[in-house]
Amino acid sequence: MKTLIIICVIMAASIMGYNQYKTNEAVNKPVSTFVNKKISRSVQNAYKNHKKNVHVKGRGKVANPPTQHEIDNNFQTFNVRLKDNHIVSIHHNLQVSKFIPDLQEGDDIKFSGEYRYTDEGGEIYFTHKDPKKQHADGWIEHNNIKYQ
C-alpha cells in the first residue's frame, strides 16, 4: 500500500511539473548572452510593478516573425525576448516611423519606447519620434540602423 501511495504521489508531481513546463514553454527557450542586463532592467521593473505609460529601453532577440497589424497595417508588430526570457510585444507605428526591412526571428534588436503592462509580459509603443511632443522619443535599432 505504501508503494502504491508513493507511486501516485510521484505520478501526480510529474504531471504537475509537465503541465507547468508546457504552459511556460515560451519562457524556457535559450537566449544568447549578448544582452546587456542594465539596458533591459527598466522593462523588467515596469513588468514587475505593473507599470503603464512609462518610458523604457531594452535589448533582446526577435522572438517571432514580424507582422503588420491585421486591422489597418499601420503597425509592424513583433515580440522581443530579453535575456531573462521575458517577452515584450513591440508595436512600431508605420504612420510615424519607417518600416524595418529584413527583420527576422532571432535578430538582435535594441528599443526605446513606452511600456504598458499586460499579463503576457507587456507592450511597447511610441518607438518613434513624437511629432506632438507628448511622449519621450523612442526608437528601434536593427543591424546598426536606428528607426525613429
Image (cartoon, rainbow, N blue to C red):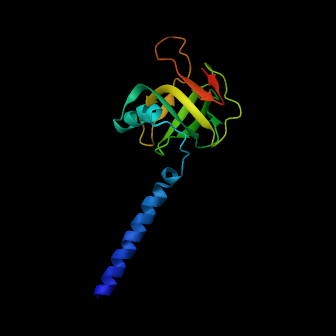
Residue 105 lies in quadrant: top right
Name the one closer to the observer, 38 or 122. 38
Where residue 44 sits in the image (x, y, percent)?
A: 41, 37
Where residue 59 sits in the image (x, y, percent)?
A: 53, 34
Residue at the spot 52% in from the left edge and 38% down from the top edge: 35
Q: As drawn, which residue projects farthest toward the right? A: 102
Is 110 left or right of 6, judged from the image as shown?
right
Residue at the spot 37% in from the left edge and 75% down from the top edge: 10
134 up-or-down from 58: above or below: above
What is the quadrant of the N terminus in the image?
Answer: bottom left
Name the one closer to the observer, 39 or 87. 39
Residue 121 lies in quadrant: top left
Q: As drawn, which residue projects farthest toward the left? A: 2
Name the one closer to the observer, 17 or 77. 17
Q: As drawn, which residue projects farthest toward the bottom? A: 1
Residue at the spot 37% in from the left edge and 72% down from the top edge: 12
Residue at the spot 46% in from the left edge and 44% down from the top edge: 84
How many badges with numbers are in the image? 0
Where residue 52 sits in the image (x, y, percent)?
A: 39, 29
Name the one closer to the observer, 46 or 58. 58
